[in-house]
Image (cartoon, coloured by chain):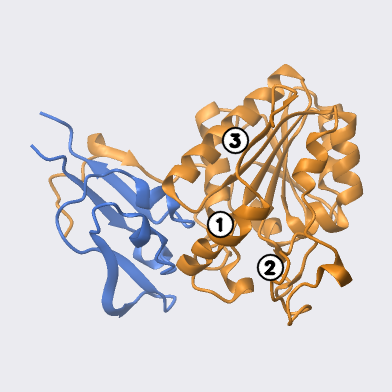
Amino acid sequence: MAIEGTVVVEIDRCKGCGLCIEACPQHVLDFADSKVNIKGYRYVVLTSAGCTGCTNCAIVCPDRVLTIYRKKEA
Amino acid sequence: MESTDIIKPENLVYKRSRLMTEQPLSYCPGCGHGTVTNLIAEVIEELGIESEVIGIAPVGCAVTVYDFIAIDWIGAAHGRATAVATAVKRVLPDRYVFTYQGDGDLAAIGTAETIHACNRGENITIIFVNNGIYGMTGGQMAPTTLEGMKTSTCPYGRDVNMQGPPIDITRMIAVLSGTYYVTRQAVHTPAAVRKTKKALLKAFELQKTNKGVSFIEIVSNCNSGWKMSPVDANRWMEEKMFKIYPLGDIKVDGKMLV
């Protein structure tokens, strides 16, 4: 069974630098379509299934806006 | 695309360190300072030393760090962080003392303090974020600015005949007998971040052994100062900065490598 993970974004803390999008090995992160957060920055969202919860995006994020969950193997 | 069956406390694999305050970081989007600040908080949390650690924040982009990590801090005059750290460590030798400095602070105005603290072999950790520019004041040339690099005070690029070549202060202090662990890392990729975290852990642990200065340079981007997007700035850093400031350990256990 594939490893299942997910990302929770603290939208209003995101500054839209895009470093997590670059770091994601599964290419499942992208900017939200024509939306900005309370500070006026573009923000990142999970765009499709396939996240493995590898934490690469979270540790390159300078503002640590991403919280990562990974499903435990049954 | 957030699956609620995965978002459970027992499935949590990563979240921001609890030592980080709720205050949003004042750094520009994509700045390496944010990653380094968070790594310091994570390392202090992992070692469980938050009540025994004293940080020294001098002037520069590094100064605002005392708003973000909930530990004891002292603000130092520009460049004088290592001198203040010396005093703190001598008065309270059982505490973990570290400085958090940029290149304008450590390699320009604070050169004398840095070199002499390293020469004396003070038992402190120096964290040096090198982005080759004076970020906070508006992107002026720093001693660490690369040859040909454009800044607001050298708009045609740094001319080595006029301003000299970039200073490699990390190599300079590595030859001093007072330094015990000297390394150069970066935070632009997940792998680099993990290596930097290991280096920070090692540096803090070394303070228990009273061996001397542990010095960590972190080559960082300054996308506002360099006038690039964060992703482009990291690519540029890989191409240009790492040639002049190659990553890796320089001195381990008091012995020079290479």
Q: Estimate the x, y position of residue B71 in percent, counting from the top left.
A: 63, 41
Give B188 or B89, whichever is nearer the viewer: B188
Outermost residue to the top: B209
Q: For the point 77% across and 50% down, which residue is it? A: B168
Marks 1 & 2 on one chain: yes
Marks 1 & 3 on one chain: yes
- Spatial CA span between label 3 and label 2: 23 Å
Give B79 or B147, whichever is nearer the viewer: B147
Q: For the point 60% across and 28% down, which residue is it? A: B202
Report in which chain the residue with disc 1 lies: B
**Callout 3: helix, strand or loop?**
helix
Task: Give the residue type at disc 2.
Answer: Gly
Q: Estimate the x, y position of residue B24 in percent, counting from the top left.
A: 51, 61
Q: Mark 3 points at which residue?
A: B200
Q: Name the residue under label 1.
A: B32
In primary-sequence order, the first of circles 1 and 2 is 1
Whether residue B87 is visible:
no
Outermost residue to the left: A1
Q: Contact, CB < 8 Å: mark 1 with mark 2? A: no
Instruction: In the picture, one chain is orange; tell me its letter.
Output: B
Quadrant showing the C terminus of chain B:
top right
Q: Write down the colour of chain A.
A: blue
- Spatial CA span between label 1 and label 3: 15 Å
Residue B24 - label: none
**Disc 2: CA contacts within 10 A as few (<14), some (14-19) or many (>=20):** many
In primary-sequence order, the first of circles 3 and 2 is 2
Q: For the point 54% across and 65% down, which residue is it? A: B236
Q: Mark 2 points at which residue?
A: B135
Q: Is residue B69 above or below residue B151?
A: above
Whether residue B120 is visible:
yes
